[in-house]
Amino acid sequence: MPYRTLISPAHEIVEVPPHPRLRPGVCFYRGLRIDTDQPRRRLELPVGVATLLLGFDHRLAVAPVDADAPTAPTTFNSLFTGMRTKAAIGEHPGSLHGIEIVMRPWAAYAMFGVPMHQVADRLVEPSDLGGAVVGRLAERLAELPDWPSRFAALDEMLVRWQSAGPGVAPRVLHAWDILHDSAGTLPIGDLAAELDWSERQLERRFREQMGLSPKSAARILRLQHALRMLTAGRPLAEIASRAGFYDQSHLNREIRNATGLTPGAFLAQALRGPAAPNRLNGNVTTLMLEP
């Protein structure tokens, strides 16, 4: 059954699971219809998923976060983001209508056949994934009359693309599960030994199908573990120790590098700002910012 939230007559979120053949790679579809008179800014945090946003009739300005060298935003109607090591700021003037598909990077590899390292840490047009067919996907869905027909069309297309796409190496999936279960703290040499691969083999296949090296993916998992404890009010020294950082200074640098904010500023913004939707259970995915 779909999960539907109607915050107001002008703010609707409809979330449904994908076809069983797409799980667990595709996490969920989320239909969005937002129409307010207030601009919205959100800090989208590094997390172990890829997102395909298919916009129907509004545009979104997105800029990667770089605390040392700010980047001007790029405007998209639709966009794909692979696994990222740094946050991005998304902003719209108050109107947004479309569908968000949240998936594991290996599922995007299986459907589109594009090596994920080509789109990691980037914001790309959907046509960069699969040419005109994927590029026209938003237009095709926008022409359908309601959410159920759009979700059904997505199921049909994604199952077909996945069936025709390249296979995913089982050891890559196992590597991700092991890293995830350790919250990114397992040494990469131990991970390679567990899989009976050399570290070079592991890195090559992992980058192809996940986008980042195992070491960079582990950093994202440690960051998420730290942000969960930070927003739960745990002391920084405890967070650093439990999340696998050398010390509190190392933790501070990692959070600032990934989010553009110090731990204190991040927590203050999280407490001050409005509640943000959580894109993936068990992760801190979004921080609402003041316009």
Image: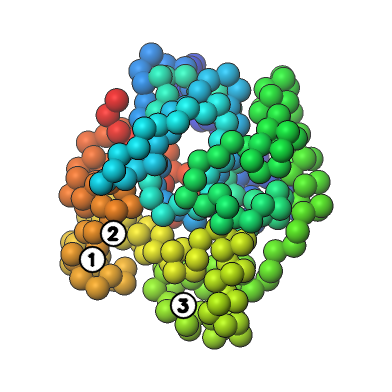
Residue 52 drawn at (x, y percent): 59, 40
The disc placed on residue 250 is 1
Q: Position of residue 144 (x, y in %)?
A: 73, 22
**Quadrant assignment for the C terminus:** top left
- Three-letter code, disc 3: Ile
In the image, what residue type sits under mark 1?
His
Quarter of the image for the N terminus: give it.
top right
CB of mark 2 within 8 Å of CB of mark 1?
yes
Q: What residue sits 75% from the left and 35% below the top?
A: 133
Q: Earlier in the sequence, mark 3 or mark 1?
A: 3
Instruction: Name the residue beneath numbered marker 3.
Output: 188
Give the CA distance from mark 3 to mark 1.
19 Å
Q: Nearer the viewer, residue 274 or 161?
A: 161
Kind of residue at disc 2: Glu
The image quarter in which residue 173 lies:
bottom right
Give x and y (percent) for residue 200.
Answer: 55, 77
- Residue 240, located in which quarter of the rendered image? bottom left
Pointer 2: what residue? 254
